Amino acid sequence: MRLIFYVVVGVIILTLLRSVFEAVGKAFSGGSPSPAPPSSSAPGGQAPQSLKKDPVCGTFVSMATAMQKTKGGETYYFCSAACRDKF
Ligand SMILES: [Zn+2]
């Protein structure tokens, strides 16, 4: 069973040598270019969320999700149906 031992040792040595050569190759290839920082940072100036003040409780609510009620030609925004009903 000596042959298997030599084969295993040979594979290990080859693997080590290959990793060494890869490391040396990288070192001599002018330095790996630093990976560019992922430009996934959120776009700084997103459209300002249009917030409306709930006239009942004073909470600022997003126009997109707020309850709405039109009164006297003006649209009011509320945080909840309870506030809207109180208005
Ligand atoms: Zn409210």
Image (cartoon, rainbow, N blue to C red):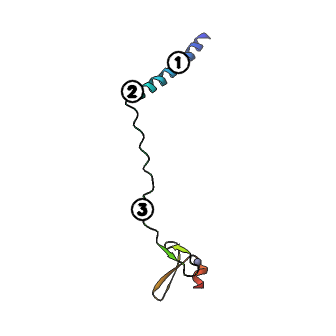
Res. 55 mark: none
Image-quarter location of ligand 1: bottom right
Q: Earlier in the sequence, mark 3 or mark 2?
A: 2
Q: Which residue is mark 2?
A: 28
The percent coordinates of residue 80 (x first, y second) are 58, 77
Q: Which residue is mark 3?
A: 45
Please tell me whether residue 31 is drawn above or below residue 6 in the rendered image.
Answer: below
The CA span between labels 2 and 1 is 22 Å
The amino acid marked with disc number 3 is: Gly
State left or right for residue 82 relative to residue 42. Answer: right
Q: Which residue is mark 1?
A: 13
The CA span between labels 1 and 3 is 55 Å
The amino acid marked with disc number 1 is: Ile
State the SS at label 3.
loop
State the SS at label 2.
helix
Q: Earlier in the sequence, mark 2 or mark 1?
A: 1
